[in-house]
Amino acid sequence: MVFASLGFIALLVVPTLDHRFGRGSSFLVAESRGAVVGFAQFVHRLAESAELTRIYVLPARQRGGIGTRLLEAGLAECAEERLKRLTVSVERDNRIGRRFYERSGFGEPREHSQDVRGFALDLVEYRRLIS
């Protein structure tokens, strides 16, 4: 478990060993004044890549840099582990999410569908190099 302070946000990195989340996965939690305000999970998929499987910031705290700080902390951790690429999938109609990833350096969008309990989810996968 790693703890780092990012200004008014404390970031807790909890490596997960649960096989459902993937080998070497990390769950990052942003908190402010003792309350959780956001989180992100990075799952190592292949020897050189990881996937950002979830990121969430409370609506009242959005547009304050918390999501960016979570992403940057995850990218830094991936870089330490010498991973080369990060992918993320977002719902095709989620314009706010897509804009966040595009502004954060993700590109190469590829549309695909995923079956989630009988429901077809239309997604866009983005990629970003880890530097």
Image: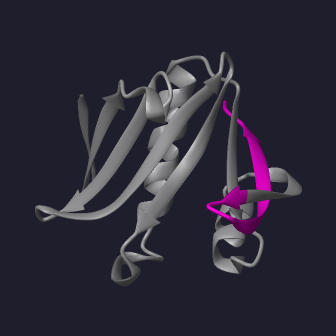
Residue situated furthest left in the rendering: 34
In screen coordinates, is 49 left or right of 16? right
Q: Which residue shows up at 69% across the image and 76% down it?
A: 94
Quarter of the image for residue 16 reads top left
Q: Which residue shows up at 79% across the image and 60% down it?
A: 124
Q: Nearer the viewer, residue 10 or 41?
A: 41
Q: Nearer the viewer, residue 53 or 34?
A: 53
Q: Is residue 117 visible?
A: yes
Residue 119, how many percent across, how many down? 69, 69
Task: Determine the main secondary structure of the stretch shown in magenta.
Answer: strand
Based on the picture, tell me whether residue 116 belongs to the magenta stretch.
yes
Residue situated furthest front in the rendering: 118
Q: How is the image coloured?
A: one colour
Based on the picture, tell me whether residue 129 belongs to the magenta stretch.
yes
Q: Is residue 23 above or below residue 109?
A: above
Which corner quadrant holds the N terminus?
Answer: top left
Residue 128, how many percent across, how many down? 74, 42
Q: Which residue shows up at 50% across the image and 33% down it?
A: 76
In the rendered structure, which segment of residues is drawn in magenta?
Answer: 115-131
Q: Which residue shows up at 64% across the image and 70% down it?
A: 97
In screen coordinates, is 9 left or right of 105? left
Q: Is residue 48 above or below residue 91?
A: above
The image shows a total of numbered marks equal to 0
Which corner quadrant holds the C terminus?
Answer: top right
Q: Nearer the viewer, residue 15 or 37?
A: 15
